[in-house]
Amino acid sequence: EVQLLESGGGLVQPGGSLRLSCAASGFTFASYTMRWVRQPPGKGLEWVSSISGRGDTTAYADSVRGRFTISRDNSKNALYLHMNSLRAEDTAVYYCAKLLMGGYYMDVWGKGTTVTVSS
Amino acid sequence: SYEVTQPPSVSVSPGQTANITCSGDKLGDKYPCWYHQKPGQSPVLVIYQDNKRPSGIPERFSGSNSGNTATLIISGTQAMDEADYYCQAWDSTTVVFGGGTKLTVL
């Protein structure tokens, strides 16, 4: 069964840092582009970042560029999101998602991990 | 930056057809797709590549895509279809979501 399991969320003060992890299983992780998507409380979905299967191509939303870094370790079937200079508006549930092979669509999502930025 | 627009809410009676639209400049060229999300759950892909359904998605879900508008069509809507629906497009390296449409079945 294909599964994604996020971890690493929590309460952090403004200006702080956090690293989210996403453990993948049930598929050939290195073959797939992966994404992070977040959802602030009571609001809609917002794409955060994408990374290619080999990790050599990344992309970021304007709202996080320069503060967040996406990475992956294909030997560990793990996806990461390093978040620095956190702001209150970064408070959200963060989902990792796998892309459909050869496509632009996210066919498997994790259950999410909650990040709260507050003093 | 690229944007797509959805109506905030759509209401439909059980058994009727629900149409949820998503509009954006040349959206048809931006690989639009649809997700639904029920309260407390993760999003689920329901339609991609104009009118394809992932495994496990009922046949009552279909899609159309023409020019600047993509439409999610739910035929014979059931109470279990009540959810938030999001369209998503891809523009160069950027992923864009619509604001979401709350589908109410009443």
Image (cartoon, rainbow, N blue to C red):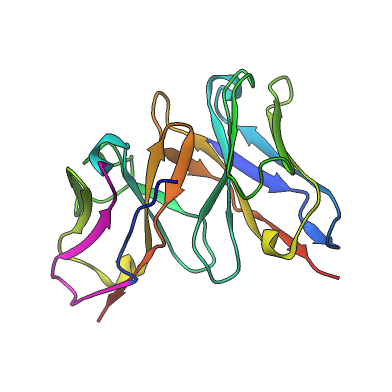
Q: Residue at x 33, y 40 (%)?
A: B55
Q: Residue at x 29, y 50 (%)?
A: B24
Give left or right: position of A34 versus B1. right
Question: Does A57 appear above or below A4?
Answer: above
Total numbered labels: 0
Q: Is residue B91 magenta?
A: no
Q: Residue at x 32, y 62 (%)?
A: B6
Task: State which region is magenta.
Answer: B9-26
Quadrant of the image containing the C terminus of chain B: bottom left
Question: Does B17 appear above or below B96?
Answer: below
Give left or right: position of A32 versus A13. left
Percent coordinates x, y for residue B52 in the rendering: 25, 39
Give left or right: position of A93 versus B103. right
Quarter-wise, where is residue A42 in the image? bottom right
Q: Residue at x 53, y 25 (%)?
A: A32
Percent coordinates x, y for residue B57 in the rendering: 30, 48
* Residue most extreme to the bottom: B106
Quarter-wise, where is residue A100 in the image? top left
